[in-house]
Amino acid sequence: MMSRSLVATLVWVLAAAGVPGQAFTSPLGFDEREGNTFFVYWSTIRRLQVVDNTCHKVHLAGIKQAAFRRDRLNGGAASYARRLQVELRMGLLPWGSAQSVFERNFRPGTRVVVYSAKVTDMPDWRGVPNPPPGPWDLVLPFDAGFDHPGGEALVWDVSVQSASGSGIMDGQYRPSSNSSDQRTPFGLGCRRIGAFNSAWLDMTLHNHGTAGVGIRPVVSYGMGRAPVYIALDAVRTSMRVPGLCTELQVVPNLLFTSASLRTDDTGFMVFPEIILPLAPVLVGQALYAQAFMPDSSQPGLPWLVTQGITAKVPALPPPGIECLHLWERRSAQEAEYIEVGGAPLAQFSN
């Protein structure tokens, strides 16, 4: 009789060698087990990206297909069989370094277009699988294989164009995040020409554990259809800058802007979540922020500036699923939302 250690070693060697018939799910462990939630996808023009560290110990060479399945719930009338334009990319990324710009979430040299953009048949997901879970029946056979060596988070990134319909996917989600419940504004913001209210910045901090510290700024009463720049620092600095419409409250030692998003006509924008790598010294640390928007109508320097705001990094949350997903409906470059703690389920096999 072979020892357990020898069996385990043989399994690892066979998987690493790319022996056909090996498979795993992302998030891990749901080949024959239903997830605890659902995600609506496969509709209009959308991009979904998953950064999954639950698979970092998986070693599988020669991955040649991905598959997805419906949730145990009724998919509704919109989940009918139809044809979609689909593209799938895969790569690797060190866990804890994800951000809102999709292409930056591939470690250089690892991104592979495994399923090139093409018309793809979507199965009928209107029925309820009996018994659940449903079959992995939305299958994408790869144009280029992918080797998953382990050691890093797996990234899979799918773009869809569809004139109509949707699909409810099986998924797993167990969020673990602490949020700041107190933030303090300070200083004064400027007003754009003709505005009643001063430009305003709000900010919420999230401790996502090993996924990093999230910063979510929200701008109101700013310039319409303008880019926003967020200055971030660990100290407050109140100083007069000749020509600037208000005091500089935060020296932009860290400066962030969106690659593609702009404020709406009213000057409102929910800024994509900024993710900083987690360091123990950040817990309890106050962070200070101030926002800037180009404004040529200002009498001095051409910038509309908000007041400053500060909040403290919350405590570490309890352990959660080391997986996150990003999605968008407006821009192919940048996510509207980053959700930490789970993702839709996919199965990869060789």
Image: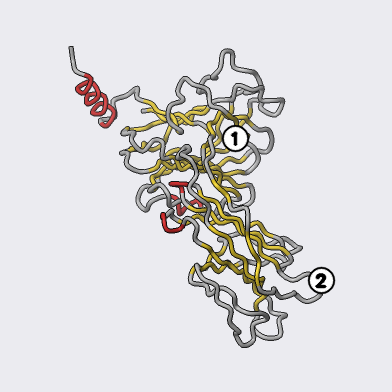
Q: In the drawing, does residue 220 fall left or right of residue 216? A: right
Locate residue 317, reporting x and y percent: 50, 44
Q: Where is 108 relative to 309, above or below?
A: above
Numbered circle sitting on residue 84: 1
Numbered circle sitting on residue 122: none
Q: Amino acid at mark 1?
A: Leu
Locate residue 171, reporting x and y percent: 54, 31
Locate residue 97, reporting x and y percent: 43, 52
The alpha-carbon separation of the residues under discs 1 and 2 comes to 47 Å
Residue under the image location 74 percent in, 66 percent down: 221
Callout 2: 10 Å neighbours few (<14), some, many (20+)?
few
Q: Amino acid at mark 2?
A: Phe
Residue under the image location 66 percent in, 22 percent down: 74
Q: Nearer the viewer, residue 288 or 277?
A: 288
Q: Where is 4 relative to 238, above or below?
A: above
Q: Where is 66 relative to 218, above or below?
A: above
